[in-house]
Image: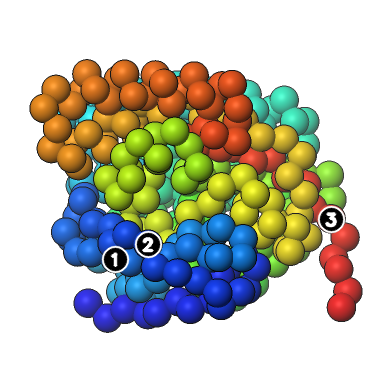
């Protein structure tokens, strides 16, 4: 598989980087990828991901849960059960912020969040790279979903009260290009909502290279609260609030135990997930995954 080599930090633009572990793609290809860390800001990223043109093959599997509607296997059944709960959590979060009820969901997957918000009275639109997931959402829910190219070519003319990325920013090639687009499309009183895994969490430390949150090579970038704030600030956004994602520590722990081929993995995962959940509740900066609520700032002129 053709790869690219990243030699500059996407957060602080430093070239002072070091290689860490090799991380295995446990869910689809079995290939190994190099995890790197910036010595200047601590940002982590995959040094040798596939090219953007070839990355789609790493999503084309029922094992990639967010693009699949299968209910086969215990982990998958848990995922779909939790998804239904989280749809209500997400909608309550957005409605509580009280912006204009227009929504652009980046990485809309199979469309369940778009449909849920449409039923809450929102005018919704999605962006999804995977043809199968995008077409499934259009057919099943009759929602308006486009390709990333459509977005990057400036064909989305609306502005939005909310732009959401639920575990999506870590997937995006050329993230600065997307941040610029978000700034242009978000209304002045709107909210950018980003949820990403946190490599400074208890479960990330506990599982190391087996941590499900790395999910290489689909996850290119690996944030912690400091590096997410740094990238946001450089792109004229400010983090105004952070929330932990309550189910992610359990899901990540159970999936990580599966990757380790651990005996009594569900029990061990449930215990580790509980510790990670409590740790994240005591300090959101150590949560397994963090939701960042951002407002845009005036564009900085150089």
Q: Badge 3 is on which residue?
A: 297
Whole-number angstrom distance, CA of label 1 to CA of label 2: 10 Å
Where residue 33 is drawn, which disc sits there?
A: 1
Give the residue number, with chain letter if any, for mark 2: 20
The disc, 3 or 1, on the residue closer to the chain's N-terminal end is 1
Circle 3 — which element? loop
Classify 10 Å Cα crowding around label 2: few (below 14), some (14-19), many (20 and above).
some
Q: Nearer the viewer, residue 70 or 1?
A: 1
Q: CA distance from mark 3 to mark 1?
A: 36 Å
Q: Nearer the viewer, mark 1 or mark 2?
A: 2
Where's residue 107, x and y in %? 47, 52
Instruction: First in sequence, mark 3 or 2: give its number.
Output: 2
* Residue at 73 percent of width and 44 percent of height: 239
Q: Looking at the image, is 212 positioned above or below residue 252?
A: below
Task: Identify the mark at residue 196; answer none if there is no mark.
Answer: none
Q: Is residue 179 above or below residue 301?
A: above
- Quadrant of residue 69 within the rendered picture: top left
45 sits to left or right of 136: right
x, y percent for residue 226: 65, 49
**Any part of residue 105 in sight:** yes
Q: Position of residue 63 (x, y in %)?
A: 21, 46
């Amino acid at each position: 598989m053709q790869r690219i080599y990243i030699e500059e930090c996407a957060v602080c633009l430093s070239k002072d980087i070091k290689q860490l572990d090799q991380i295995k793609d446990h869910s689809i290809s079995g290939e190994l990828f190099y995890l790197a860390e910036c010595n200047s800001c601590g940002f982590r990223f995959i040094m040798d991901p596939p090219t953007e043109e070839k990355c789609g093959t790493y999503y084309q599997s029922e094992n990639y849960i967010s693009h699949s509607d299968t209910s086969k296997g215990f982990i998958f059944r848990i995922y779909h059960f939790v998804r239904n709960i989280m749809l209500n959590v997400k909608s309550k979060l957005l409605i509580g912020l009280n912006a204009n009820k227009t929504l652009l969901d980046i990485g809309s997957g199979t469309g369940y969040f778009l449909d849920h918000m449409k039923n809450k009275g929102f005018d919704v639109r999605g962006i999804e790279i995977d043809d199968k997931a995008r077409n499934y959402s259009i057919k099943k829910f009759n929602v308006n979903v486009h390709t990333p190219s459509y977005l990057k070519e400036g064909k989305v003319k609306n502005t939005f009260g909310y732009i959401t990325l639920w575990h999506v920013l870590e997937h995006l090639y050329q993230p600065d290009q997307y941040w610029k687009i978000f700034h242009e499309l978000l209304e002045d009183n709107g909210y950018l909502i980003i949820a990403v895994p946190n490599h400074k969490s208890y479960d990330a430390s506990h599982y190391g290279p087996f941590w499900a949150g790395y999910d290489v090579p689909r996850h290119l970038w690996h944030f912690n609260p400091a590096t997410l704030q740094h990238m946001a600030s450089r792109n004229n956004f400010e983090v105004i609030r952070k929330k932990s994602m309550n189910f992610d520590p359990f899901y990540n722990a159970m999936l990580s135990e599966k990757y380790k081929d651990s005996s009594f993995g569900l029990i061990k995962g449930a215990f580790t997930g509980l510790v990670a959940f409590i740790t994240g509740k005591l300090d959101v900066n150590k949560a397994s995954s963090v939701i960042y609520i951002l407002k845009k700032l005036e564009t900085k002129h150089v």
